[in-house]
Image (cartoon, helix red, strand yellow):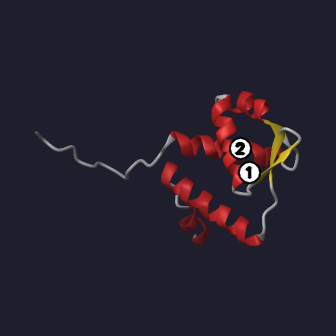
Amino acid sequence: MEEEKNTGPRDYTRAVYQNFMTVIELLEKKSPLPVSQKQIAEETGLSKNVVFDICWNLSKRGWAEDANGSVRLKKGSADKDAFMGRMVVRLVRDAYGVDLDALKKD
């Protein structure tokens, strides 16, 4: 049996990462206003269960806060904002093959 040859960079795209980033991007766009989970589901096309899971995890980790049944991104400390920035850079690199660190050096 012949082995498949790797013809390019490995694709690290995963639906869970894409869904997470979709919710983060929407919350960032609406910030500082809170957004209901129903509205997030409608605007992103994600299921209510996926939106609930993402929002719950964001809140549990301190990245978002509940606002009377809605959710909004929480203003972070400089350390937390820097960490989030590094995480986004890695996700963009892994999902899209774009190295943002290399772009800023040019």
Circles 1 and 2: CB atoms closer than 8 Å: yes
Q: Nearer the viewer, residue 103 or 90?
A: 90
Find residue 59 and name its label.
1
Q: Secondary structure at mark 2?
A: helix
Distance Cα–Cα, label 1 vs label 2 = 6 Å
In the rendered image, the residue lying farthest to the front is: 60
Residue 15 % position (x, y): 52, 39
Q: Residue at 74% of width from left, 57% of height from top? A: 62
User: Which residue is rendered at x = 61% and y = 64% of the image?
Assistant: 86
Q: Give the residue at x 73% y 27%.
A: 42
Residue 37: percent from left, percent from top = 76, 35
Q: Look at mark 2 in the image and give the residue it sits on.
A: 55
* Mark 2 residue crowding within 10 angstroms, few (<14) / some (14–19) / many (20+): many
Question: Which amino acid, mark 2?
Answer: Cys
Left or right, residue 9 beside residue 40: left
Relative to 1, does residue 43 appear above or below in the rendering? Answer: above
Q: Nearer the viewer, residue 15 or 3?
A: 15
Q: Residue 67 or 4: which is nearer the viewer?
A: 67
